[in-house]
Image: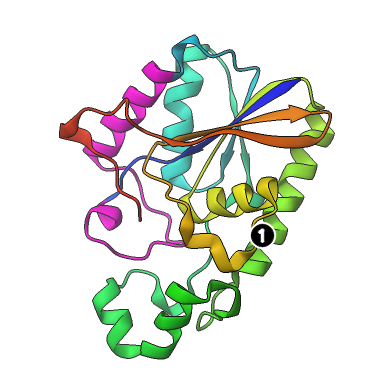
C-alpha cells in the first residue's frame, strides 16, 4: 500500500492580496518560503519515495524545499498546473464581482456550471487531474509513497476524484497554503486519510485558503 501526500504551495503576493492567480507564474513570497520550511519539518517523519510538482514556479519552489530535505529530485508535471481562470487572473474578488456578477455567482454557488471568460472549466481541469494520477501511477505503481505539490484548485479536484464528490460540492473543502492531505493507495483505489492539515504552521506564517 502506498501513501499519496497532496501538498499545496506556499503563499504568494497574490494570495496575500486575495487575487486570482490561476496560471500566472508567480514565486513564493517570504511568508510562503517560511511556510514551505515548516511543511518540510512536519513531513520529516513521513517516508517519501518520489516527489512530483506542478510545473509552475510557486509549486516548484515549495517542492524544492521538500526535495532538498530528502536529497531527492522533484519531477515537474504540466498536468498539475493550476486551473486557468482566463480574464480573471491577476484581479481581486471585488473587481471580478463588479465586472462579472453572474459568472462569480456561478463560480461560488454552482462551480459545475461555471465557464470562465477565456479560461478553463472545472470539468476540464478535473480531467487533467485524472490524467496526472494515471501518468504518475503508470510510472510509479501503487506501493510507493508519493508527494504531489500543486495548487488549491487542483487539490480540491484531486480530492473530488478520490472521494467521488461531485463538482457542485467543490467549495465544501478547504485547502490552505502548504496544507497536506493524505491518501492511502490500495492497488489503485484511493482512500482519504486526512485533509487540509496545516496546524503545524505558527501564527506568524498562517496559511490562506485562496
Residue 22 seen from this side: yes
Name the side, left or right, on which 142 lies relative to 180: right
Name the side, left or right, on which 159 lies relative to 37: right
Q: Which residue shows up at 84% across the image and 35% down it?
A: 138
Rendered location of residue 22, percent (x, y): 45, 62
On-image quarter of the C terminus: bottom left
On-image quarter of the N terminus: top right
Q: Which residue shows up at 60% across the image and 17% down it?
A: 48
Q: Which residue shows up at 26% across the image and 62% down it?
A: 18
Rendered location of residue 196, percent (x, y): 44, 39
Residue 100 seen from this side: no
Q: Is residue 40 magenta?
A: yes
Rendered location of residue 2, percent (x, y): 72, 22
The correct choice, above or below, for 36 with respect to 88 in the image is above
Span shown in magenta: 13-42
Name the residue carrying label 1. 126
Amino acid at each position: 500500500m502506498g501513501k499519496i501526500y497532496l501538498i499545496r504551495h506556499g503563499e504568494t503576493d497574490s494570495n496575500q492580496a486575495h487575487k486570482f492567480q490561476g496560471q500566472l507564474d508567480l514565486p513564493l513570497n517570504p511568508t510562503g518560503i517560511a511556510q514551505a520550511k515548516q511543511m518540510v519539518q512536519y513531513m520529516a517523519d513521513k517516508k517519501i519515495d518520489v516527489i512530483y510538482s506542478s510545473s509552475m514556479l510557486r509549486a516548484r519552489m515549495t517542492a524544492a524545499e521538500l526535495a532538498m530535505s530528502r536529497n531527492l529530485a522533484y519531477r515537474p508535471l504540466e498536468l498539475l498546473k493550476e486551473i486557468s481562470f482566463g480574464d480573471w487572473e491577476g484581479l481581486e474578488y471585488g473587481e471580478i464581482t463588479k465586472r462579472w456578477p453572474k459568472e462569480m455567482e456561478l463560480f461560488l454557488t454552482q462551480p459545475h456550471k461555471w465557464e470562465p471568460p477565456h479560461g478553463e472549466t472545472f470539468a476540464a481541469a478535473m480531467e487533467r487531474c485524472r490524467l496526472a494520477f494515471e501518468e504518475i501511477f503508470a510510472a510509479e505503481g501503487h506501493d510507493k509513497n508519493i508527494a504531489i505539490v500543486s495548487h488549491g484548485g487542483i487539490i480540491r479536484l484531486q480530492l473530488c476524484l478520490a472521494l467521488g464528490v461531485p463538482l457542485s460540492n467543490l467549495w465544501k473543502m478547504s485547502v490552505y497554503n502548504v496544507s497536506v492531505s493524505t491518501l492511502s493507495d490500495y492497488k489503485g483505489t484511493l482512500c482519504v486519510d486526512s485533509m487540509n492539515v496545516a496546524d503545524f504552521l505558527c501564527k506568524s506564517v498562517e496559511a490562506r485558503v485562496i
